Amino acid sequence: MTGKNIITKEILSANELISGASVYLSYAGHWLPEMQKARVFLESEKDERDRQLVLAENSCRLISLEIVRVKHSKGRIVPYRLRDRIRASGPSSPRLLPQKTRASDHVSL
């Protein structure tokens, strides 16, 4: 233990229902794809964080809402969990162009 006071910092993360994109709640109350624009909640702001979670859940636009523990490093927001760092940097597999299909490519079930 280094003797430093550890201040809990958190951001809110979700996925857009339609696109599946990872998004983060900003200080302006908008959900943006850039983690570096995320609102950072301190432990003393737990009630406001929870209020924002309820608003997001009721929007019917977002899924997989999460509270993500973060730290600041070199002026940037950095999640503690590897999973969240990967999500913030984009897909780990290449993005492919949408598949072009014709009506005859579909099978009626």
Image: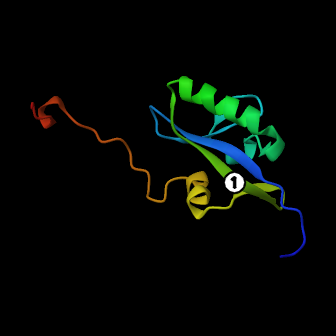
Residue shown at the point (62%, 61%) measured from the top left? 81
Q: Position of residue 58 (x, y in %)?
A: 55, 24
Do we see residue 26 in this rendering?
Answer: no
In this view, 11 is above or below 85: above
- In the image as oriented, which residue stretches furthest toward the bottom? 1
Residue 32 in which image quadrant: top right
Q: Secondary structure at mark 1?
A: strand
- Image-based side of 91 in relation to 41, left or right: left
In this view, 71 is above or below 97: below
Q: Position of residue 104 (x, y in %)?
A: 12, 32
Residue shown at the point (10%, 35%) measured from the top left? 107
Query: How many numbered callouts?
Result: 1
Do we see residue 43 in this rendering?
Answer: yes
Residue 31 in which image quadrant: top right
Q: Position of residue 51 (x, y in %)?
A: 69, 29
Nearer-the-camera pick, 19 or 57: 57
Nearer-the-camera pick, 104 or 20: 20
Residue shown at the point (28%, 38%) measured from the top left? 100
In this view, 23 is above or below 8: above
- Image-based side of 106 in relation to 34, left or right: left
Q: Amino acid at mark 1?
A: Arg
